[in-house]
Image (tube, coloured by chain):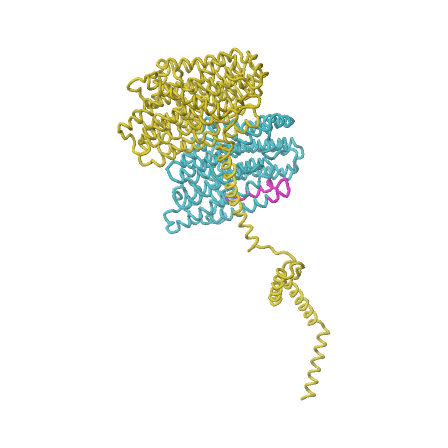
Amino acid sequence: MSPYFILVPILVPILAGILLMTFPIQDYKTRAAAVETVVILNTILVFVLLLNRPAERLYLFSFVEGLPLTLNIDGMATFFGGLVAFLWPLATLYTFEYMRHEERVNTFLSFYTITYGVTLGVAFAGNIVTMYLFYEALTMVTLPLVIHTMTEEAQKATRKYLNYMIGGTAFAFIGIVFYSLFCTDIEFVLGGNLDVANLGEYANIALLVYVLAFFGFGVKAAVFPFHGWLPTASVAPTPVTALLHAVAVVKSGVFAIMRLTYFCFGADFLKGTWAQTVVVIAVMVTIVYGSTMGVRENHIKRRLAYSTVANLSYILLGVTMMSPLGLVAGLCHMFVHAIMKISGFFCAGAVMHQTDKNYVYELDGLGYAMPATFTALLISGLSLTGIPLFAGFVSKWSIVQALLEEPSIMGYVGVFVLLYSALMTGIYMLSLNVRGWFSGGTAARQDSARFHDPSWLMLLPLAIFSVLTVALGLNAQALLAFVQSIATGTF
Amino acid sequence: MTGNPILLLLVLGPMAAGIVSYLIGRRNKALRDGFAIAVTSAEAVVMLLLVLMGGEVSLSVPGVCGMGLSFQLDGFRGVFATVTAYMWMMTTIFSREYLAHSRNRNRYYLFLLMTFGATMGVFLSDDLFTTFVFFELMSMASYVTVIHDEKPETLYAGGVYLAVAVIGGLVALMGIFMLYSVTGTLQLSELLAACQAAFPGNEAWFYVLGGCILFGFGAKAGMYPLHVWLPMAHPVAPAPASALLSGIITKSGIFGVLVLCTRIFAENAYWGFVILLLGVVTMLLGGLLAIFSLDLKRTLACSSMSQLGFIFVGMGMMDLLGEENALAVRGTLLHMFNHSNLKLVLFMAAGVVVMNLHKLDLNDIRGFGRKKPLLCYVFLMGSLGIGGIPLFNGYISKTLIHESIVEYIELLEEGHSVVSFAAANSATLFHVIEWLFIITGAMTVAYMTKLFVVLFAEKNRDRAVQASFEANTHYCNKATAAVLAVSATVLTILGVLPYLTLNKIADLGQGFLNGVSPKHAVNYFSLTNLKGGLYSIVIGAAIYLLVIRLGMRVKQPDRTYVYVNRWPKHLDLLELVYRPLVLGLLPTVAGFLCRCLDYVLDGLVLLGRKTTHKQLREGHLLPKGFELAYVVGSLLDGVVALLNATFCKRNPIQADFVRFFADQSRIYEETKREVMSGVSFSLMMFGVGIMVVVIYLLVV
């Protein structure tokens, strides 16, 4: 297939979004049909593209010599692009129902759709400059989505979001500039392009640059100390927090770090250096922090946001092991977490939408009123905790395997951190269900009897995610084999 | 998938049946109950046939849950899988009447069958990974059956149960990870060799990982100091669930500890010594708590803890005795087996009481059993068995464990320095342990006598109540009666014919524990062995008469007696240590640290805004260029502040001299500028100039 075809799925949603902004559709049903058609069409395009990958990369143009814009589809791009394309139509479906009674839905949906294209841009970027470009664009197009409700709280959150993102960009930019000086070729290659032979005395500078860039891209991945924006940003409407702040934006950050580590600097160069120690410690601190705060937080969505903070760092914990096994574990958890966390957020959203309840202690007895929602929440919670037979267990197991590949103190500490986090996850996720099903007795149950499950638009995505979580928990061989081939470069 | 898929059916079948029973239950409740009974009975029959046919069956299912599952059916697993299935069959039949008027029965049956499948999975597992997977599933699923009635105290106890299960499970998982990383395998059949190869040089890691795994499985097995959930969860759970919890689910914890004792630390005396001491503490504490308890099911729960302590002692002796551990192996195995059967009977008998009275306090249920021969027979069989009375089943296994301690003492006295460290070589210590063992046996006799006397001998304080108790002859239906009678009779057969029954079971199971048949068969009814049992009975009678009859009963004005709680209320490990630690200290410290982390970045921004990037605000800023005013003003401000602090405290002087001087000098400057630039000022200066010139001319 012609490499120019890579541009199509990136541009279609962007153009569609702009069109919707210029020609708003007032009727709810027409608008829903139009947007969903575009999104599904684009997803089909993505899968057609991924199944018939163009052999060579697409060169667009250069800013200056040595900083070209290129698009390319390799294993990682296939993985992330496929994940995004799979989740977007389902999330959009959910959005229609959730946003039904909100204002300015046209603007919201247009930016929502534009974000789809930009996220694909991050996935398909062929070198770090292109990725950086789309990465920045992602910040900008998601801004209107966070501020959507226009309340004072939302404005504050957006300001914080922007501050963190711009700050992170500065670090990332430093990283890119130095990297372009140190590398032989700026394109992504598994194993890295760093000119290690001629680095000589600059090796430590290169490591420093890596650490800076790690934290720069780590802002989107909510790595300590740049985690603050994520829980604050959960004031945004649920579809935003679910898809963007559990998948698209944060996973772009993680994806960028994977690219940076394995495809720019190269895992072999970083393994065993002080740079690895620094980033591993930061990641572990984030895990402990996120899971502890999850327990302390009573607002359901913020609780899930803290859980996201911790889980993103699970992925990074695998990634920072700087080994193929680590990348396998990271990718595996990236996929699994996307499914179960989006499911968790959708459940929280369904509860908010149906009952206007936002806090954990308000959930008493709701399980019987909304059985489908709470069953999905239970599956998501068990999976996040890492109970066997659910997908989360498989990916955590692979992270642990990566940690213990070579027995070391760091590995054991990592396992300990993971288990501590699992315990906390158990508490903060399962307490939602214990509240929903067992607390409050008959009185609470009668009180909540007036509520009911949301319509199929919301339940269908939940059902798909739940089934997938269980299926992957029972047999994840296909997924593992796929990420294995990416991590070893045989894809 | 390689091997015989029947093993997978045995594990997943009940789980699937659970879902089916849930669906059936939405339409037809009677059919659901029947279905559940049919499934458990079928499973019990299949297990029994498999064991009788003999031979080993194995199955591995690669790829599932990341690492793949593997199952194995050999003698030991066969025995305990059969016991599991048998107990589930009995309790499921019993559940039908016990829960006849209860809500949420669909949920109960769903999770009862789920727990069944998971427990079968634990006992049939062939690698620690599979064990762990099903162990966790079992913990989660059994939680729902424990909290069945959803009362606040039930939810609280259930919360403790779940917390211990989750924390224990995770710690065990940590240990399993470390084991995998050190030895590279989790297959039970390969672990022994792998651990023996990896142990030298990795001692520290091995003890750490062993501690982790022991923590997880020991918590389930009611080991001190992780026993707190046991006396809480049993009384609140429905009786059939208590029977299962106490009878077989605790044994799944023992299964994990057995793997530690026979695979990872096989014949390691240090390890054996630790297990032995934990066992002694557990059995003593359990016995004490049971004596002091005033709650029927709580007494039985504490008794479980005590009996599990006996099993731990057996396991400890197993490792201490090394190659000559035949008695310890057989004693441990048989006590596991016996205790499962005993607790099934006792909890179901207690369940009959609860089902009729919905009360558990000994003062309330006193006299219920009078003129109820069946209940009396059942409870008596259970009591005699667990009390270790000769001719009943508990006697056999206790004797074996006791004999293993005696054997160890003999070895020490003959001068064999069995192990290399001092404590384990002290014959005195082991004499003490032997006596503690006998005394705990006596405690068992004492608290079981207490229960029996309360239920079947004494009369209720209220005559009307006693009359209604005695009039109640239809206290259970025929199915329940049959279940009770059968399971109690099994105990008797086991006790009377130990050579035909228990010895065979020990022969079947000892291979898993690396045991061999003893060189000469043990004569259970020899004089020396009977002596131990006799000591227990005599001391037990003394404890009953002195402590319980004299110490725990208080005479009332109407010349009747009331049992009172003599246990210090605040002496509760959970309330004293764990709750403050887990719910108080931990979140506070963690929360403080997290807040600190929270403010690291935001704090930097804030610091910048307060210092280098301070924003300018109107009204607060002084005009520039008034250095003199600033210096003098500050000086005067200082004086004013001093005065305010000393003399003028009542009426402080409100003045800002810096601003005052600055304002004054600004006015002065502005006036000056205006004056200087005015035309009249120019004219005046011009005039002044002329006058100066004229005066000069006149003078000169």
**What color is chain A drawn in?**
cyan
Is B549 a magenta residue? no
- At a point 70% along the width and 82% down the height, the residue shown is B690
Q: Seen from this angle, which residue lies furthest top?
A: B478
In the picture shown, does residue B617 fall above or below B243?
Answer: below
Give how far across and how far down residue A77 sits, in percent: 47, 37
Q: In the figure, is residue B681 to the left or right of B129?
A: right
Is A146 a magenta residue? yes
Image quarter of the N terminus of chain B:
top left
Of the pair B161 and A131, the residue shown nearer to us: B161
Q: Which chain is assigned yellow?
A: B
Q: How many marks?
A: 0
Image quarter of the C terminus of chain B:
bottom right
Q: In the figure, is residue B676 to the left or right of A468?
A: right
Please say whether residue A339 is visible from this viewpoint.
no
Q: Quadrant of residue A304?
A: top right
Q: Quadrant of residue A152?
A: top right
Q: Seen from this angle, which residue lies furthest right?
A: B680
Q: Quadrant of residue B533?
A: top left
Q: Seen from this angle, which residue lies furthest bottom?
A: B700
Give the overall secondary structure of the magenta segment. Answer: helix
Please say whether residue A385 is visible from this viewpoint.
yes
Q: Seen from this angle, which residue lies furthest left?
A: B415
Residues in magenta, as a range: A132-156
Give how far across and how far down residue A461 sits, in percent: 56, 29
Give how far across and how far down residue A64 sits, in percent: 48, 49
Q: In the figure, is residue B195 to the left or right of B95?
A: left
In the picture shown, does residue B1 fall above or below A75?
Answer: above
Of the pair B26 and B636, the residue shown nearer to us: B636
Give how far across and how far down residue B530 sits, in percent: 35, 18
